[in-house]
Amino acid sequence: MDSLDDWFPYREYRPHQREMLEAAASIARDGGIAMIDAPTGSGKSSVAAALLAESRGRKVFVAVRTISQLATFMRELELIRKKRGNLKFAYLIGKSSMCPLGGEGDIYRRCEGVKSFSTALMRERAQKGSLVPANDRQIKQQIRKMDPEHPLICPYFVHGKSFVEPEDGGLKMIPSAALRVRAERVSTELIWPDQLAGFCGDICPYDTMMHAARDADVVLVNFYHLFDDAIREQLYQSLGIEGHDALLLIDEAHNCGDVVQSIESVTIEERDVVQAGHELSGRRRSPQADAIVQILPQITRFMEALKGSHEAEDWFDPAIFQRMILSGTLYRSIEEIVDDLLKISEGIREKNMQAGDFRESAIERLTEFFYRIFRSAADPAYLTVYRKEDEGAVALEVRNIDPSTKLQDIAQAHACCVLISGTLSPIESYRRYYFGDLPVTTMSLPNSFPPENRRIFCATDITTAYSMRRDKENLARTEDYITTFARLPGNLAVYFPSYDLLNTFADRCAPRIRKKQIYIESKDTAASAVMLREFMALPGTGRSGILFAVCGGKWSEGLDYRGEMLSGALVIGLPLAPFNRVRRMVIDYFRMKFGEEGEFISYTLPAVNRALQALGRVLRTPEDRGMLILGEKRFQERRVHAGLPPWMQEEMTACTVEAFKKEAKRWRS
């Protein structure tokens, strides 16, 4: 039997790293669930080596949220391969990132449609003796004539297939020799995601990686491949495995809940109801279609009634919704509506696919919404919510508020499940939130970076609590913290609970900031990306800047500001979600489930994590040096303070603005 040392790709272990890896190896060997809270620099990515050491022929699946996390594991696996020599790994990051075929509509649906049409055409030509579709004159002619915005044939799929004639007769479609060669190479060579399309050439990158994954020891996937039931089931079917054949490693595990909730929730807008009417009017009428047409004005009236509310977001009563929708119709229950919608949506989907229209229809979205409404009646983990959109439009949502059922099902369906994160603290709260009463092995590691390279402060004299937001002295002190912080050397970042507070303090502080280029996070993704690249390049030119950003926003999570890219972070306020009736109902649900701790788990814990994620951008390597400041006195409250990692609780110094000015001056010198 191979030992952990046989797979560990480094000369020596970091502090506490071996303990962490042995715990993961034990879970892989005996089965179960483990949660590991390990700060940056702990060597978390080597948990993959621990699972490989105990894999015994089973596949290791590593689920990541972002491309940067994918790259981290690719580098780790490449080091393991250099030591072991024969390790194979593949990655599947979503067809939208891998598909070179253009066109409109949902990428997965478009892929399904063009593959179906292409397969039928290729088989027809193969029956006439053309066993290599890529060389068939008629197929090539049809591809040349095809509208690239509305493709019906995928040339990349065509180049990846060929036909053989088995001894028992008939035709069998198999991967082409070109696809097999590329699949073998991508599983044994380091091909980065931005190189994959060029490497694959005229072969489908996704098919290439999927073929490589069949023989791979490790498959890297994004969260949606794991948490979306339909995608995961299709993936495992393609690979010919069951969950119990796989060892599961989930990175950035503090994000699992949010991703599951987004997958399990559904929203409809007013334009969806209007579009559904257009789709039904264009169909040959049926009793089901006629009945559904009658309820559409009822949905619109319900939405119109909500426009009079002064709330931007609030709960709506599903019982009132159901009575209003059923009133004056032949339907007796929402379940009957769901049955009719399912029949209609399946027909519309099939017709659209045949016509080369791969967009999700409004009827399909309406079907999913009514199914969720029906389900929410018996499941308190789903809330019915309305939101005021731009220009007063109303959107209705059935929102999942508790991801635990899905996470428990997935964890128990695999041979083992190991969740890792640098901010999974307090780990017992996350354990209860995700897995309830299931047995879970938990571990929290101390910070292994040199403590002399960092200073951690917590302000005791400022707050963003709503009652103090207009207090002149509080505002002035907050401004003093920001402008004092801005005088520290190097690139810096200030994070706020909301865009409103960001803009308020950016306007107040900008005139007092000297010798720093100021960057203010935009709600526009493209503009923010351009500014961020410019900011990160400043140290290389001998200059420095300061970011004004939002906790949980585009510049606070999943980014790696190594070295001089970021030398300090200041979090202003406790980034709690806006408090309204929906938030109160969520808290009440978790209080019923967990007692007093329910409010912390559902409301305070996400805010603490957003703050920790923002601070965590600074110290990415043992050589990094930086100052971390929590600009909010509520972090000194017992329950909030207990939510911080133990190492941070021990090192954090309480301060006033005057004390901070002195400490900042010492740090500069």
Image (tube, rainbow, N blue to C red):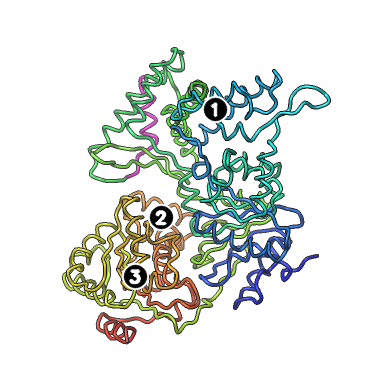
**Circle 2 sits in a helix, a strand or a loop, which is it?**
helix
Q: CA distance from mark 2 to mark 1?
A: 51 Å
Residue type of the residue flagged with mark 3: Thr
Residue type of the residue flagged with mark 1: Ile
The residue lying at 45 percent from left, 64 percent from top is 560
- Which label number is shown at residue 587? 2
For disc 2, the neighbor class at 10 Å (few under 14, some 14 to 19, many from 20) is many
Predominant SS along the magenta part? helix
For disc 1, the neighbor class at 10 Å (few under 14, some 14 to 19, many from 20) is many
For disc 3, the neighbor class at 10 Å (few under 14, some 14 to 19, many from 20) is few
The residue lying at 44 percent from left, 81 percent from top is 453
Left or right of 487 in this view: 41: right
Against 36, residue 114 (above or below) is above
Q: Nearer the viewer, residue 79 or 606?
A: 79
**Circle 3 sits in a helix, a strand or a loop, which is it?**
helix
Instruction: Give the mark nearest the N terminus, 2 or 1.
Output: 1
In the picture, the quarter occupied by the N terminus is: bottom right
Instruction: Give the mark nearest the N terminus, 3 or 1.
Output: 1
Left or right of 216 in this view: 428: left
- Which label number is shown at residue 102? none
Q: CA distance from mark 3 to mark 1?
A: 49 Å
Instruction: Give the mark nearest the N terminus, 2 or 3.
Output: 3
Report if residue 201 lies within the magenta region. Answer: no
Q: Nearer the viewer, residue 346 or 634?
A: 346
Of labels 2 and 3, the one closer to you: 3
Pointer 1: what residue?
Answer: 153
Residue type of the residue flagged with mark 2: Ile
Pointer 3: what residue?
Answer: 541
Q: Position of residue 460 (x, y in %)?
A: 30, 77
Of labels 2 and 1, the one closer to you: 1
Against 457, residue 224 (above or below) is above
Which range of residues does the magenta coloring cover?
314-328
